Amino acid sequence: MNSVNYRQTLENLFDTLTSIHNLCADLTEAQFKTPTQCPGWTVQDNLSHMVGTEKSMGGHGSTTHRATSLEFVKNPIGEMNEHEVDARRALSGSDVLNEFDQVMSSRHAQLESEPEEYFTKETMTPMGKNTMAEFLHIRVMDCWVHEQDMRRALNIAGNQNSASAELTVDRLCRTLPIVVGKRAAAAEGSSVVIHITSPVVRDIAITVINSRATVVDAPTSKPLMELFFDSNTFVELATGRATAQEARSRWKVSGDTDLGERVVGAINMMI
């Protein structure tokens, strides 16, 4: 990523963190303890997760606390996250928000002072080796997704058509060829179009060429299937917050219904 990209990424990250602060600033303790679609996590737990991750990335270390229950943990990253979340469960929501504000203020100062080389050097990310700029790009998506987890649980909509929302949708769209070609097994030569209708609008045409599903400017023949959902539904499905059946009233298929159902059923690419 070049300097323009990482600067835009930082702006998106800090805008999202500000939106999260504004969401939480007036929450009651009962609201902080509201369950979300993240299994086992409350609104406060989502906030604790972001605190722990940014604190670690800022060089302030990880908690030595160890959670006694790892019921919903699926991988080492998930276990690390659960330790950070569980370490803050005895705190009040306002205490966690105070720590969030302190950590994010420190991160803001640190990241704004770093030279360009900091963002272009190679590091380990959740997706393997890449640049720190790419890692921060992933952090924008993660923070925005968790903000939406919190908002859905509280029924307080917001920040759904922001630059961070677009970044998140575009990152999740990268997996669609794998979903269409490998997971849903679309036939050779067939095309599908996936319509994301609002607040973030995208139209993605995918054609299977030489056994590989590929994003194309436009299908060369009539699409075998077209799929329609809004961007919030797409994010819920792609991040595993809702199953195809749970969200059934919010997506529509025209053409090959069986293929459409296979695509929606396989669209979760989060681990």
Image: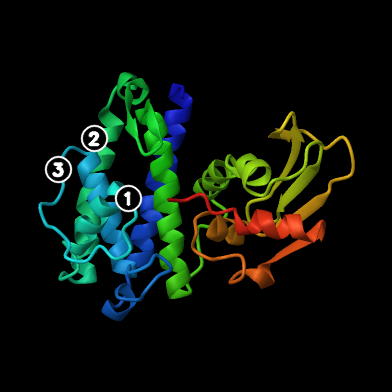
**Does residue 114 appear to the left or right of 4 in the view shown?**
left
Which residue is the site of mark 3?
A: 61
Q: Amino acid at mark 3?
A: Gly
Position in image of residue 1 (x %, y %): 46, 24
**Does residue 246 appear to the left or right of 46 in the view shown?**
right
Foreground: 92 or 27? 92
> What residue is at 41 percent from the left and 66 percent from the top?
150
Q: Nearer the viewer, mark 3 or mark 1?
A: 1
Q: Nearer the viewer, mark 2 or mark 1?
A: 1
Q: Secondary structure at mark 1?
A: loop
> What residue is at 30 percent from the left and 53 percent from the top?
78
Q: Amino acid at mark 2?
A: Gln
The total of numbered circles placed on residues is 3
Q: Earlier in the sequence, mark 2 or mark 1?
A: 1
Q: Amino acid at mark 1?
A: Asn
Which residue is the site of mark 2?
A: 110
Q: Secondary structure at mark 3?
A: loop
Which residue is the site of mark 1?
A: 75
Q: How is the image coloured?
A: rainbow
Q: Is residue 41 above or below residue 190?
A: below
